[in-house]
Image (cartoon, rainbow, N blue to C red):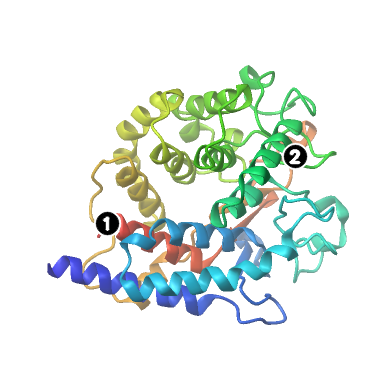
């Protein structure tokens, strides 16, 4: 009983702290948004960032664990979600369609609060599968809207819009969803992004078609082949670490027992304990611990007994949850994408705390 009480107390504190980090409306961040940071540590680069992506992630994740929270914290999650809902018109497609952008597209506000990148339209990305599927997961839509988005996904998929010039050669002629909706953006296959998209497809009750099957085959191969460990940038360029890829695929695996992902499930259950033991950063361990628990496997205690919220918050910092490999978009420069100086990292302090809450809610200590 004491452990249960301690877990409930910690969850209540984490949710309260997450709520406190939600923007009330400032010159840098609209009301309802969860602020994040852009980093390029080697160059001393740090900028405030105002994307909608992390806000969707936080709302979706908190709603997923809402049933495991103390009653007062459940109400706080509802308040967070209600406040966050108002940001979505800012990130909706500039054409007015029901897809979403990482940054506000009307007018374009890509890489805000900086000095250089926001001045060039070259760095203004189109609407994307990640931002859109997470928005739909955070705030479920009616069936007609879900069917519309599925048609939109197919229209921008590999073999329909064009042909992938990057990624594993064996999959470049498969019907795989692209990470992007833009007309001029090359086809880009990302296992983590696809896992978010397929999670939305499965949860929405949409029938699986040949595009879903090929996308699931790609995700399964990424894990079962070990490429998620050996070459994460090649198979999931925007989440290019093994813990992040495992976390995203594990969330899809926990949603449904898909036979198409049976090899991926077995591989993660076999390999994640070793990866967790070898990981140095506490948040990598948390990502792997969450994934193991989602798959019904035990994970060792990670947080330490008696740590205060202040201490846990300090330990949670430094998780770069997604990256922008700026040289990754075109075949001519992708060979340089692994150059660390060409990558920008994103961190969201409130989302890192949300991951801690997810781990605790799943029984982690």
* Proximity of marks 2 and 1: CB atoms separated by less than 8 Å: no
Q: How far, Cα to Cα, is label 2 from label 1?
A: 38 Å
| Residue 50 visible somewhere in the drawing | no
Residue under the point 73% across and 38% down: 152
* Image vertical order of residue 225 relative to residue 52, above or below: above
Number of numbered discs on residues = 2
Give the residue at x 60% y 78%.
23
Question: What residue does disc 2 label?
Answer: 329
- List x then y, in percent, for residue 32: 61, 74
Front residue of this view, candidates 229 and 97: 97
Name which of mark 2 and mark 1 comes first in the sequence: 2
Residue 111 in the image: x percent, y percent?
A: 75, 62
Residue at (33% x, 69% y) in the render: 11
Relative side of 134 to 263, left or right: right
Instruction: Look at the picture and state if 189 lies above or below 59.
Output: above
Few, some or many C-alpha atoms within 10 Å of disc 1 (few <14, some 14-19, many ≥20)?
many
| Mark 2 or 1, closer to the camera | 1
On the rendered structure, is 344 left or right of 364? right
Q: Which residue in the protein does label 1 denote? A: 364
Res 339 quadrant in image: top right
Residue 15 — which label? none
Residue 165 on image: x %, y %? 75, 26
Determine whether the residue tagged by mark 1 lies in a helix, strand or loop.
Answer: loop
């Amino acid at each position: 009983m004491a452990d249960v009480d301690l877990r409930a107390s910690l969850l209540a504190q984490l949710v309260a702290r997450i709520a406190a980090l939600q923007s009330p409306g400032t010159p840098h961040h609209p009301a309802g948004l969860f602020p994040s940071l852009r980093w390029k540590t080697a160059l001393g680069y740090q900028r405030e960032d105002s994307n909608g992506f992390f806000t969707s992630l936080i709302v979706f994740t908190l709603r997923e664990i809402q049933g495991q929270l103390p009653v007062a914290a459940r109400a706080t999650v509802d308040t967070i979600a209600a406040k966050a809902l108002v940001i979505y018109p800012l990130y909706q497609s500039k054409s007015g369609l029901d897809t979403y952008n990482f940054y506000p597209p009307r007018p374009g506000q890509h890489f805000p609060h900086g000095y250089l990148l926001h001045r060039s339209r070259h760095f203004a990305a189109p609407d994307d599968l990640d931002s859109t599927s997470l928005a739909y997961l955070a705030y479920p839509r009616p069936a007609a809207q879900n069917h519309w988005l599925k048609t939109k996904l197919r229209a921008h998929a590999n073999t329909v819009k064009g042909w992938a010039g990057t990624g594993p050669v064996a999959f470049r002629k498969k019907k795989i969803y692209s990470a992007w909706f833009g007309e001029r953006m090359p086809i880009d296959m990302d296992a983590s992004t696809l896992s978010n998209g397929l999670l939305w497809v499965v949860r929405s009750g949409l029938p699986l078609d040949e595009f879903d099957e090929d996308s699931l085959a790609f995700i399964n191969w990424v894990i079962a082949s070990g490429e998620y460990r050996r070459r994460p940038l090649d198979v999931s360029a925007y989440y290019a670490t093994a813990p992040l890829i495992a976390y995203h695929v594990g969330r899809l695996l926990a949603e449904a027992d898909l036979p198409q992902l049976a090899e991926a499930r077995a591989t993660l259950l076999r390999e994640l304990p070793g990866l967790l033991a070898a990981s140095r950063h506490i948040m990598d361990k948390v990502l792997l611990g969450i994934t193991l628990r989602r798959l019904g496997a035990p994970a060792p205690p990670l947080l330490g007994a008696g740590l205060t919220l202040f201490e846990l918050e300090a330990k949670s910092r430094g998780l770069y949850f997604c990256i922008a490999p700026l040289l990754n978009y075109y075949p001519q420069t992708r060979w340089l994408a692994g150059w660390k100086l060409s990558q920008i990292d994103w961190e969201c302090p409130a989302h890192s705390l949300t991951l801690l809450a997810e781990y605790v809610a799943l029984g982690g200590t």
